[in-house]
């Protein structure tokens, strides 16, 4: 049976899912005695109603682009990398070490080195679960989840010990030198004579866009991408074609971990400008939802990341302006994840049937329902 | 009430069924008379299984009527089909592996909360059924310990236990040796004598000729003819199935074997469960000949292909054109086998030969994706892939001729053509072919066989593995029979017949003596998926 047309798969279904999620969220908001229409207005205005709102939306989106791409790449090899959170934390460690240990004269030099540091540390953290999966068959979902906890514990250990500023009470590293601060959107637009709100949005967003393009190139235009997709579709076929499962599992996870690690460029180097205990703030997990909603396609990941960025920012505004509690905002985000990820089939199946019934009657390629 | 003998056991009137834009059954009418064996024959995708699924309540027909014993019947689900006295034996058995025969038979037909009375009743009935119909099965054996032939009998017993008097069998001989198939046919004849009605779905012309009373031919969702078997012959049936004249035998000249291409010595394979799958294989294959490996599925042929294709590690010695092939380690992979000049049409095109969700043009490079001809710098040259696929589509007449179609949307025969095109166009020194025509329609079989013979005539070596004895006999220049991981013997196709090969396939080397069926079965029970 033929499936949906492509545009319905990539655009219509996510849209319907989103509308359903908003509808149920509206009911919940109504239930706690607030006006859902007003709440939605506040969220939309807060997220995209000003340069300030856009700045935060795209700042969050940058984080989600990296973690979303990380999940997407692994998913093309049918590996469910739940460890984006931990890999991003290790990436943060890598970025911090690179930035603090070398006295960088200018951010343009520090940035490539930090990208390398973040990616390498993230990849290294993904390498261990990948090896255990490829050689020992330990399930990657379990190991990557466990590695999130280990990463978090490792960071605490370092931040109360070796990396702590002597004499300081806070479990964090020293502030990064000013020469390594990344130019913010405000700086860049100011140079062009445009005023932009004071937000943490910085040049990493461009890096995120580049990462989307590079990922697209990797998955659909290179031999490695071909092998990753083939392996993801059928391991037995990959073995037949001379594709080594070990190599693909390792490479896909290294790239995945590297992408997750690069998130720290935005969060740590771009905003926090020091290594904090909790520097990822759940973006690793949001990345799973972003990849699911974006159908593991870089363009889809980009759009879904911006949507989730807007949800984060709009949610923050909603909390600020109304008595809708913070937890409620999390509930709304969770509903979006639930509808776009887990309940996808609920929309997909009736829609497929509708398309089959009313769709153009193309002559069938293969006859028979056997 | 009309006379029982003249009221059809089953009558279908104007049955139609579509899956989206695909019309699987078009206005089908058919009568099956009681106490007969009625064959339904047709190519893959002709709509046979859909029709039977409607009869068994899996699908609902869009239009048309089912009449059972002269009365209109509604069959919304399989429960209703069973209640109407219809039993079905599927191609893939639906048995609980770790239950006993008796437990499987009772499953779903238990009476009351306690199992014991049902089991006792079933045991009594079972012993009667085995007497009446030669359906001998140990009621207390576990399914996983039984061979496929026995498992099939359990399926038949299940249907009879539910008091079926109309029995539908879907491709029942696909997994059986010739001897087991003969036994099955004796059982079916016994059932017919007792007045049961049997519908036999198959694509094997010989079975239709041997056992059916009436045969219906299906083509592209339509029933093109229903004739008395005695009044027709295999070539007329084949013509009706395909819609044109078909060569049933492969036309080929005698082989001209030249230099040795492949030499296998003492090849051994122990699988993940520590079961020895190949127990010392010795074979020689020359350029310009086709060596056919016959055997019942599961006797090591798959493992042999996998080892030679670089998909599985082994011990022993294999040389190709005089050079040793590594059998273990990183250089034993499929990539290096292809570089050495081995092409491989795998047994299972869905699990191995194709990525079903890839476009046809993406599949054209599968296994050869590191070929420089497909590269443009660091990237893959997708235009080159598409050009290549389009050329192969035309040369091999793949239909529809659309290189953007996903592999899964081609019919079985056209999928196989894509694989064959990819592998044969590499002009390999050695071609490995597993089940080249499994699930492939008759028209495409002819074409695929011609391609394989053409490669041989071009002076290449071909190793053919097939469970279809007909295919082995008509295509091979030499036949080796495998049983339980060993080569039982080699024969020339002109000097042997199905009976002798069948005995070798059952592990009996003394082919002059006439062994009893029990001996054959005892032997067959040693093989298969069980650990010793």
Image (cartoon, rainbow, N blue to C red):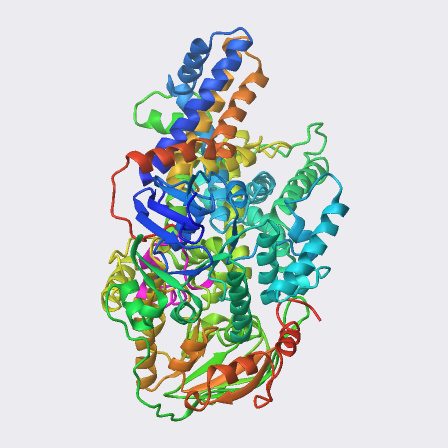
- Is-magenta flag for residue B356? yes
Q: Which is nearer the eye, A356 or B296?
A: B296
Examine the image and state in which quarter residue B478 appears: bottom left
Residue A240 in view in this figure: yes
**Image point 45% across, 35% down: which residue?**
A293
Residue A216 position in % (x across, y down): 38, 47
Above or below A350: residue B78: below
Q: Residue at x 43, y 71 (%)?
A: B210
Q: Residue B322's spot in the image, x, y percent? A: 47, 90
Question: The magenta stretch spans which residues?
Answer: B352-376
Left or right of B495 in this view: B420? left
**Considering only vertical position in the picture, is B237 above or below A201?**
below
Q: Is residue A305 in the magenta section? A: no
Q: Above or below — where is B21 with respect to A223?
A: above
Q: Quadrant of residue A326?
A: top right
In the depicted structure, whether residue B185 falls above or below residue A113? below
Q: x and y percent of residue B10 in the render? A: 42, 49
User: Which residue is nearer to you in this view: B496 or A352?
Assistant: B496
Percent position (x, y) of residue B268? 61, 79
């Amino acid at each position: 049976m033929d499936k949906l047309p492509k545009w319905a798969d990539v655009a219509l279904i996510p849209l319907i899912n989103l509308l359903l999620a908003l509808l149920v969220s509206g009911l919940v908001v109504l239930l706690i005695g607030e006006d859902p229409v007003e709440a939605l207005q506040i969220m939309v205005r807060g997220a995209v109603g000003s340069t300030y709102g856009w700045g935060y939306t795209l700042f969050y989106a940058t984080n989600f682009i990296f973690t979303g791409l990380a999940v997407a790449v692994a998913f093309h090899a049918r590996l469910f990398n739940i460890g984006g959170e931990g890999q991003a934390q290790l990436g943060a460690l890598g970025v911090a070490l690179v930035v603090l240990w070398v006295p960088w004269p200018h951010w343009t030099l520090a940035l490539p080195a930090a990208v390398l540091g973040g990616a390498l540390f993230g990849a290294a953290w993904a390498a261990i679960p990948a090896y255990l999966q490829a050689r020992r068959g330990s399930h990657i979902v379990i190991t990557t989840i466990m590695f999130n906890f280990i990463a978090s514990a490792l960071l605490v250990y370092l931040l109360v010990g070796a990396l702590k500023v002597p004499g300081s009470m806070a479990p964090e590293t020293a502030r990064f030198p000013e020469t390594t601060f990344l130019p913010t959107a405000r700086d860049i637009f100011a140079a062009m004579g445009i005023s932009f709100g004071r937000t943490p949005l910085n040049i990493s967003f461009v890096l995120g866009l580049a990462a989307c393009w590079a990922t697209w190139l990797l998955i659909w235009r290179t031999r490695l991408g071909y092998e990753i997709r083939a392996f993801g579709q059928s391991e037995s076929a990959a073995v037949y074609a001379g594709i080594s499962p070990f190599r693909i599992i390792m490479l896909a996870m290294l790239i995945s971990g590297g992408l997750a690690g690069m998130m720290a460029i935005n969060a740590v180097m771009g905003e926090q400008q020091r290594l904090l205990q909790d520097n990822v703030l759940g973006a690793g997990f949001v990345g799973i939802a972003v990849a699911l909603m974006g159908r593991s396609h870089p363009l889809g990941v980009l759009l879904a990341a911006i949507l989730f960025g807007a949800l984060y920012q709009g949610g923050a505004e909603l909390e600020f302006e109304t008595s809708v509690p913070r937890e409620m905002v999390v509930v709304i985000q969770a509903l979006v994840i639930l509808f776009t990820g887990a309940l996808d089939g609920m929309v997909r199946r009736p829609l497929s049937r509708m398309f089959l019934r009313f769709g153009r009657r193309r002559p069938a390629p293969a006859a028979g329902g056997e | 009430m009309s006379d029982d003998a003249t009221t059809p056991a089953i009558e279908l009137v104007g049955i139609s069924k579509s899956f989206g834009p695909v019309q699987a059954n078009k206005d089908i009418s058919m009568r099956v008379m009681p106490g007969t064996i009625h064959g339904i024959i047709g190519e893959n995708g002709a709509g046979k299984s859909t029709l039977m699924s409607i009869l068994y309540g899996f699908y609902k027909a869009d239009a048309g009527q089912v009449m059972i014993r002269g009365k209109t019947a509604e069959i919304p689900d399989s429960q209703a089909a069973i209640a109407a006295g219809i039993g079905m034996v599927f191609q893939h058995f639906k048995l609980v592996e770790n239950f006993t025969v008796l437990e499987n038979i009772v499953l779903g037909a238990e009476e009351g909360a306690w199992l014991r009375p049902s089991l006792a009743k079933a045991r009594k009935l079972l012993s009667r059924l085995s007497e009446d119909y030669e359906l001998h099965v140990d009621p207390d054996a576990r399914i996983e310990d039984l061979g496929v032939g026995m498992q099939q009998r359990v399926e038949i017993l299940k249907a009879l236990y539910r008091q079926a008097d109309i029995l539908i069998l879907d491709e029942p001989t696909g997994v059986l040796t010739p001897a087991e198939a003969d036994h099955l046919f004796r059982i079916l004849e016994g059932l017919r004598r007792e007045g049961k009605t049997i519908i036999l779905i198959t694509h094997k012309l010989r079975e239709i000729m041997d056992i059916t009373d009436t045969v219906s031919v299906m083509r592209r969702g339509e029933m093109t003819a229903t004739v008395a078997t005695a009044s027709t012959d295999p070539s007329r049936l084949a013509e009706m199935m395909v819609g044109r004249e078909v060569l049933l035998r492969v036309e080929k000249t005698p082989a001209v074997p030249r230099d040795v291409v492949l030499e296998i010595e003492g090849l051994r394979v122990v699988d993940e469960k520590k079961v020895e799958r190949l127990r010392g294989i010795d074979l020689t294959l020359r350029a310009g000949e086709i060596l056919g490996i016959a055997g019942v599925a599961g006797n090591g042929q798959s493992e042999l292909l996998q080892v030679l294709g670089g998909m599985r590690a082994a011990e022993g010695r294999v040389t190709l054109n005089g050079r040793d092939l590594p059998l273990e380690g990183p250089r034993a992979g499929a990539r290096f086998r292809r570089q050495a000049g081995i092409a491989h049409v795998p047994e299972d095109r869905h699990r191995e030969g194709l990525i079903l969700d890839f476009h046809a043009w993406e599949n054209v490079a599968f296994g050869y994706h590191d070929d420089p001809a497909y590269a443009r710098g660091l990237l893959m040259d997708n235009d080159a892939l598409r050009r290549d696929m389009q050329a192969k589509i035309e040369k091999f007449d793949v239909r529809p001729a659309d290189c953007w179609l996903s592999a899964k949307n081609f019919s079985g025969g056209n999928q196989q053509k894509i694989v064959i095109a990819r592998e044969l166009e590499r002009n390999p020194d050695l071609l490995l072919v597993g089940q080249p025509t499994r699930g492939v329609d008759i028209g495409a079989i002819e074409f695929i066989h011609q391609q394989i013979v053409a490669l041989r005539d071009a002076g290449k070596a071909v190793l053919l593995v097939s469970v279809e004895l007909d295919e082995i006999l008509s295509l091979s220049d030499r036949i080796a029979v495998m049983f339980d991981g060993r080569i039982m013997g080699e024969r020339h196709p002109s000097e042997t017949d199905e009976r002798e090969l069948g005995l070798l396939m059952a592990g009996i080397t003394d082919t002059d003596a006439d062994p009893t069926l029990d001996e054959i079965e005892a032997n067959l029970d040693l093989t298969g998926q069980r650990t010793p």
